[in-house]
Image (cartoon, rainbow, N blue to C red):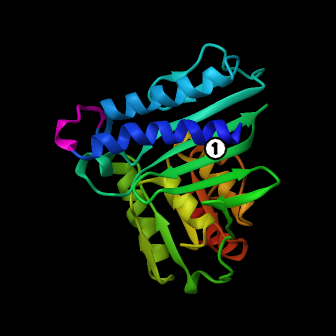
Amino acid sequence: MLNTAIKAARRAATVINRASFDVERVTVTEKQHNDFVTDIDQAAEQAIIETLLKAYPGHAILAEESGASANLNDESEYSWIIDPLDGTINFMHGYPNYCISIALQQRGVTTQAVVYDPVRNDLFTATKGAGAFLNEKRIRVTKHDRVGNALLSAGHGAGPRALADYLKMYGVMAERCHGIRSAGAAALELANVAAGRSDGFFEKGLKPWDIAAGALLVTEAGGIVGEFNGESDYLHKGDIIAASPKVFGQMVTLLSPFA
């Protein structure tokens, strides 16, 4: 199943890479303020779904653009959670930071994850209980044990309230860490935490397709993922902190007032 997800991600990357050479021709629709979808999101998603369902026609689908398949319910044994192009705004502007995110859940538990960065040709994969990998090399979260030594990443959703909350959280964290980066693709930020490129990530108001694959990468790389209050229902609540273990605890202490 992991190999099928990798195949699907590479098919989507072909669609995205072809379009990236002339982004001015991409058709853009605004779903809500600062939340966009392009015809490339839709074409990449279709390529992913076709690949997955060809191999596993009975599996359920939850995808960002097309939504939930008719057979997705609490009884679904296997369901795929898909973000065909995480970082759409970046892609629209030609900013090279976006990715494809595919996760597989078995009876509600995420068991397989693929995050593929088509710009850098970085393939992040994880299987529950078997570790996380970048281009087939095992990855681990950083060993830093203090927020004071950490490089963090973060993001904010659409709308004035989301921005206001983010600015408050940014102020709290920025004065305590080495720096905060906000590159606009949550799945890729989580993958970077798993790979030890940053020490932690936080964001509110995300959707399951933004975080399902990246969260498994982090936990399989030895990190911890949770809500702002430290609880574990982040996939449905959409508020997430992901970090190496000791940094995670300190981030929860600092960010719990925003839960």
Q: Which residues are magenta?
A: 22-32
In magenta segment, residue 214? no
Mark count: 1
Left or right of 245 in this view: 63: left
> Helix or strand or loop: what does disc 1 sit on?
helix
Location of the N terminus (image quadrant): top right
Decide which of 195, 74 is in the foreground and name it.
195
Location of the C terminus (image quadrant): bottom right
Decide which of 13, 80 is in the foreground and name it.
13
The percent coordinates of residue 40 (x first, y second) are: 34, 34
Left or right of 24 in this view: 43: right
The percent coordinates of residue 33 (x first, y second) are: 28, 39
Decide which of 203, 211 is in the foreground and name it.
211
For the residue carrying disc 1, how many other residues have a C-alpha within 10 Å: few (<14), some (14-19), or many (20+)? some
| Amino acid on which disc 1 is placed | Leu
Q: Is residue 179 visible?
A: yes
Q: Is residue 236 visible?
A: no
> Where is residue 224, by image quadrant?
bottom right
